[in-house]
Image (cartoon, helix red, strand yellow):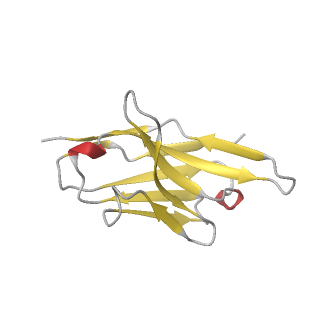
Amino acid sequence: QVQLVESGGGLVQPGESLRLSCAASVSILRFNPMGWYRQAPGKERELVATIRTVGQTNYADSVKGRFTISRDNDKNTVLLQMNSLKAEDTTVYYCKGLSITTDGYVSEYWGQGTQITVAT
């Protein structure tokens, strides 16, 4: 069974940094891409950043230049380094892995989420 477990959330002040980690129970090479999403109460879940197996990354405009996504295939882990955090970054962050089989079967896997709170 595939499991994605996020860690690294917490409470920080504006301008500070956090690093989120998403550990997979299987090889992350089966997911393309892997990514981080966030969802505020009453709002739709939105993309934060994704990374493909070949390393290509994609970021939401709101986090470009501040957040960096990376992957460690040996450790089956995807990281999100978040710098210069703002109050508007406060919400729950989710890790996602997308798997597409050779016959086109699509599976999405989500972690349980980790809370980020940016406040003075």
Please determine whether, in this image, residue 70 is positioned above or below residue 85.
below
Please determine whether, in this image, residue 115 is positioned above or below residue 55.
above
- What is the quadrant of the N terminus in the image? top right
Please determine whether, in this image, residue 13 is positioned above or below residue 15.
above
- x, y percent for residue 22: 51, 50
Direction from residue 108 to residue 89 in the image, left or right: left
Q: Residue furthest top?
A: 42
Q: How many marks?
A: 0
Q: Quadrant of residue 56?
A: bottom right
- What is the quadrant of the C terminus in the image? top left
Q: Residue furthest left?
A: 120
| Residue drawn 53% across the image and 43% down it | 5
- x, y percent for residue 49: 47, 57
| Residue drawn 60% across the image and 65% down it | 52
Q: Looking at this view, is 3 or 103 the one in front? A: 103
Q: Quadrant of residue 34?
A: bottom right
Q: Looking at this view, is 44 or 97 the one in front? A: 44
- x, y percent for residue 66: 31, 62
| Residue drawn 26% across the image and 56% down it | 17
